[in-house]
C-alpha cells in the first residue's frame, strides 16, 4: 500500500526541525549502508550517534503517535528511531530495496513499512522525487514539508538527483503488527469504511458488527 499521510508535523514543529537541521553537521550517507547500497547512494545524513538525531527523532515519533491515519495504515508494533538525510548538488540514491532486518539496540526490527517524512517544500529544490516501483508501474512522490509517504519495504525505490537546492527529509521503518501488506491494506480500508459509516449515522448494530469483524481479523493476523 502506497499512502500519503498529510500534516504529520505542525508548522511550529516543522520550523524547529528545519532550524536545527539547517545548522547541523552532516556526514556521508554511505556510512550506514552495505557495499551494494554504497555504490548507488550519494547523500548526507545526521550521524546515528548524534544527540540531535535522537532529539529530533523523538519529536517525529511523538507526532506519529497522535496521527490516527498513520496508525491505521501502518499498525506499528515497533518503529525504528527516525534518521535524517539531505540531498543536494546532484545527490541521489539509485534503485534499491531496503534491508529486511534493521539493527536496533541489541536486537533487530523487521522492516515491513518504509516511511519518508518530507521536511523541504517542493519549491525549495528541483529533482529529488522519491520513485517507488510496484506492479502498477513507477510512482513519483514529492510532498509538501510536513507530509509523509508510507509504502511496503519490499518495494524497489530510488531518489532522483537533486539539481537545485536541498531536499531534507526524515526516514524510518516500521515493523507492523500485520506482516502482510495485503492484509494491512484490507484492515486499513475496513477501518476507514467503519469510520465513514459511523459518521453518517448508519445502523449502529451493523457498525458494531463490522467493528467486531475488524478486530477479530486483527486478532487473527497480528504479531505482538
Image: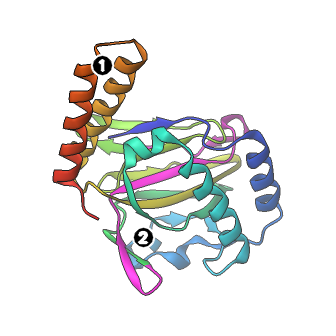
Q: Is residue 161 visible?
A: no
Q: Position of residue 82 (x, y in %)?
A: 56, 63
Q: Residue at position x 33%, y 33% from top?
A: 191
Q: Quadrant of residue 127?
A: top right
> In the picture provided, is 135 more to the left or to the right than 162?
left
Q: Position of residue 145 (x, y in %)?
A: 66, 40
| Colour scheme shown | rainbow
Q: Which mark is residue 204?
A: 1
| First-in-chain label (2 vs 1) | 2
Within 10 angstroms of label 1, few (less than 14), some, or many (20 or more) residues? few
Q: Residue at position x 55%, y 50% from top?
A: 64
Q: Which mark is residue 194?
A: none
> In the picture provided, is 68 more to the left or to the right than 215?
right
> In the picture provided, is 116 more to the left or to the right than 163?
left
Q: Is residue 121 visible?
A: yes
**Quadrant where the image shows the C terminus:** bottom left
Q: Dot 2 lies on which element? A: helix
Q: Nearer the viewer, mark 2 or mark 1?
A: 1
Q: Which mark is residue 37?
A: 2
Whether residue 217 is situated above or below residue 169 in the rendered picture:
above
Cα separation between marks 2 and 1: 52 Å
**Residue toward you, 167 or 183:** 183
Give the magenta range.
104-131
Q: Position of residue 123 (x, y in %)?
A: 71, 34
Q: Is residue 20 magenta?
A: no
Within 10 angstroms of label 2, few (less than 14), some, or many (20 or more) residues? some
Q: Residue at position x 60%, y 77% from top?
A: 48
Q: Residue at position x 25%, y 43% from top?
A: 215
Q: Are marks 2 and 1 in contact (CB under 8 Å)?
A: no
Q: How many marks?
A: 2
Amino acid at each position: 500500500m502506497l499512502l500519503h499521510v498529510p500534516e504529520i508535523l505542525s508548522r511550529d514543529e516543522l520550523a524547529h526541525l528545519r532550524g536545527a537541521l539547517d545548522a547541523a553537521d552532516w556526514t556521508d550517507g554511505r556510512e550506514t549502508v552495505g557495499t551494494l547500497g554504497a555504490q548507488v547512494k550519494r547523500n548526507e545524513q545526521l550521524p546515528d550517534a548524534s544527540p540531535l538525531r535522537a532529539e529530533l527523532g523523538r519529536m517525529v515519533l511523538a507526532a506519529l503517535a497522535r496521527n490516527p491515519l498513520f496508525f491505521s495504515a501502518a499498525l506499528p508494533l515497533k518503529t525504528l528511531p527516525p534518521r535524517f538525510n539531505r540531498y543536494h548538488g546532484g545527490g541521489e540514491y539509485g534503485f534499491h530495496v531496503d534491508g529486511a532486518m534493521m539493527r536496533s539496540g541489541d536486537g533487530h526490527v523487521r522492516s515491513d513499512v518504509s516511511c519518508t517524512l518530507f521536511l523541504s517544500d517542493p519549491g525549495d529544490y528541483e529533482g529529488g522525487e522519491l520513485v517507488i516501483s510496484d506492479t502498477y508501474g513507477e510512482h513519483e512522490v514529492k510532498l509538501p514539508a510536513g507530509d509523509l509517504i508510507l509504502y511496503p519495504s519490499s518495494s524497489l525505490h530510488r531518489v532522483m538527483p537533486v539539481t537545485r537546492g536541498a531536499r531534507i527529509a526524515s526516514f524510518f521503518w516500521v515493523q507492523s503488527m500485520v506482516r502482510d501488506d495485503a492484509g494491512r491494506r484490507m484492515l486499513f480500508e475496513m477501518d476507514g469504511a467503519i469510520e465513514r459509516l459511523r459518521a453518517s449515522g448508519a445502523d449502529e448494530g451493523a457498525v458494531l458488527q463490522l467493528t467486531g469483524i475488524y478486530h477479530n481479523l486483527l486478532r487473527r493476523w497480528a504479531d505482538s
